[in-house]
Image (cartoon, helix red, strand yellow):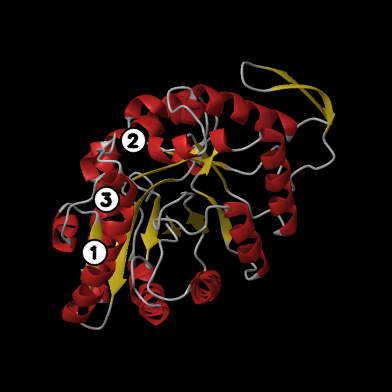
Amino acid sequence: MQFGVFDHMDRAAVPLDRFYADRLRLVEAYDRAGFYGYHVAEHHATPLGVAPSPGVWLAAVAQHTKRLRFGPLVYLLPLYHPLKLLEEICMLDQLSGGRMLLGVGRGISPIELRYYGIDPDVAPAMYAEALEVILRGMTCTELSFEGTYYRYTAVPMELAPLQRPHPPLWYGIGRPDAVPWAAERRVNVVANLGGKGMRSITDRYRAEWSALGHPADKLPLMGVSRHIVIAETRKEALEIARRGYHKWRDSFLVLWRKHNMQLPNPNALFPEQFEEAEAQGRAVAGTPDHVREFIQTSIDEGGLNYLLCRFAFGDITCDEALQSVELFTRHVQPAITPAPEDA
C-alpha cells in the first residue's frame, strides 16, 4: 500500500509568488514524510490550475526534493508538439535522478482544448498518435513516424530518460472497459470514483494482470484521490475543509459556468457541500482516528493499493495543510493495512 499527493494547484487567496513558495514548502514536507508520488494537474485559463506548464513547476519540485517521485496527472498531449514534450520528459527524468511519473491524457475539458485551437472530437486520435511518438522516441536513437497528425523522418534522439524504457505511465480511468489497455501496458491508474465503482476497476485489473501471467507483487498502482483535512478536533477540521472546498469547487466550475456547459462526465462533478462529498466517500475531515477509519474503509471497499491525498485545496493555508500532513504521517498512515487482496 502506497500513499501519494494530488494537487490541482488551484488559486488561493495569497499572491501568486507566495502561492508557489508555499507549495514548495508543502512539497518538501511530502518528501520528508516519505510519500510515494506527487501528481499535479494541468489546466489552462482557469483558477483551477495555476501550473499550466507542469514541466516548469516539476523542474522546481525536482530541485526541492530528494526521494519524492513526481509527474503530471496528466499531460494534455493534444496541446503539445510531441518532440518538444519528449525532450522535456527526458530532461525531467534525468534532472531528478529517475523520479519522473509520466501521466498522459487527452483532457477532460473541451473548453480548454478549444482555447488552444484543438477540436475536442479529434483530440483522442491526436492523443493516441502523440503517445506513440513519445514512447517510441524514448527507445530509439533516430525517430521516424507517419501518422495523420504527426510525421517525422529520421529525427535524431539526443536525449533519453534515465528510467528505461521510459518513466512509469499513469492514466486517469473511469470505466472497467479501459482496464485491458492499461494492464497490457503496465499503466498505473487513478480515478475519482467511489468504492463500488473503483472495485469494478481494481477487480478487473487484477484479473487481467493475472491472465497476462504477471506476478501479483508487480501489480501497478491503482488509486483514488480524496480531499483530506486533519486537525485535533472534528470541529476545527470541518471549518478548514468547508472553507477550502467551497473555493476549490467554485474554481472547478468557473469555465463551465462561463460557457453555460455541463461537465461531460457526471462523476467529475462534486456535490455543493463538503459534507455531501464526505457522505459519498470522496472527502474526509476530522481527527486522526476518524480519518484513519475513513481511509481504511476506502482501501478495503475499492481494493486499492494507492491513495492520493489532497491536503491543499481552495484557500487552505500552507500551515493548515502542513498540520494535516504531520498528523497523517504520525497517526494515520502507520495504522493502515493493505486491501485484503494484497495483505
Please report the residue visible at 58 percent of the width from the left and 63 percent of the height from the top. 68
Residue type, numbered disc 3: Asp
Residue under label 3, please give it: 300
Q: CA distance from mark 1 to mark 3?
A: 29 Å
**Closer to us: 141 or 121:** 121
**Closer to us: 25 or 170:** 25
- Quadrant of the image containing the N terminus: bottom left
Which image quarter: residue 236? bottom left
Please report the residue visible at 19 percent of the width from the left and 62 percent of the height from the top. 274
**Lower sequence index among marks 2 and 1:** 2
**Closer to us: 201 or 42:** 42
Q: Is residue 283 visible?
A: yes
Determine which of the numbered discs, if any, sits on residue 246 in the image.
1
Residue at disc 1, secondary structure: helix
Callouts 2 and 3 close, C-beta under 8 Å: no
Tell me if residue 23 comes above or below residue 158 in the rendering. below
Which image quarter: residue 10? bottom left
Residue type, numbered disc 1: His
Q: Position of residue 120 (x, y in %)?
A: 43, 28
Residue type, numbered disc 2: Gly
Is residue 297 rendered to the left or right of residue 91? Answer: left
